[in-house]
Amino acid sequence: MNPIRSMIERGSGLVKGVYRLRRPRLRQARNGCPYLSVQLEDMSGSAQGYVWSGQVSNLEGLQEYACARVVGNVRVRNDGAVLDIEHLQVTSDRLGEVVRLLPYSLCPKPW
């Protein structure tokens, strides 16, 4: 599992792990295609992520603070690093990492 902070500091590379979802919103691009905007969080920080039109399908269980298994890539924009998510699946299996998955927005100083 990659902590969010280390992924953002690297600025590129593969993202694979389980993270908390924040503010999942189905939106529409300028060309009319749907996409999902979501913020991923763990105890180290947060990162903005996007699921583009080809991967927006089963949105069942997609809610605030849900845990999701994520696979994607980090991309750097002018305003910082974002995640292009290739696969997002809501899961109840936290792999024994309940503490690591405390959302940074709720507990910025976990220790």
Image (tube, rainbow, N blue to C red):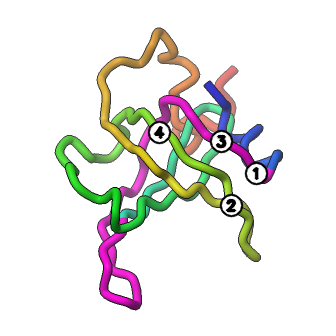
The amino acid type of the residue labelled 3 equals Leu
Q: Residues within 10 Å of mark 3 (few under 14, many from 20)?
A: some
Q: CA distance from mark 4 to mark 2?
A: 15 Å
Magenta stretch bounds: 11-35
Q: CA distance from mark 1 to mark 4?
A: 16 Å
* Image position, residue 85 (x, y; %): 49, 52
Residue at the spot of label 4: 70
Q: Residue at x 61, y 52 (%)?
A: 47
Q: CA distance from mark 1 to mark 2?
A: 6 Å
Check whether the beta carbons of the residues at disc 1 and disc 2 lie within 8 A of each other. yes
Q: Place residue 100 in its image quadrant.
A: top right
Q: Is 12 placed left or right of 93 in the picture?
A: right
* Image position, residue 83 (x, y; %): 59, 55
N-terminal-most mark, 4 or 2:
4
Q: Residues within 10 Å of mark 2 (few under 14, many from 20)?
A: some
Q: Residue at x 61, y 40 (%)?
A: 15
Q: Quadrant of the N terminus?
A: top right
Q: Mark on residue 14?
A: 3
Residue at the spot of label 2: 75
Q: Residue at x 41, y 18 (%)?
A: 94
**Image height check: is 57 above or below 30?**
above
Foreground residue among 36 and 65:
36
At mark 2, the secondary structure is strand
The amino acid type of the residue labelled 2 equals Arg
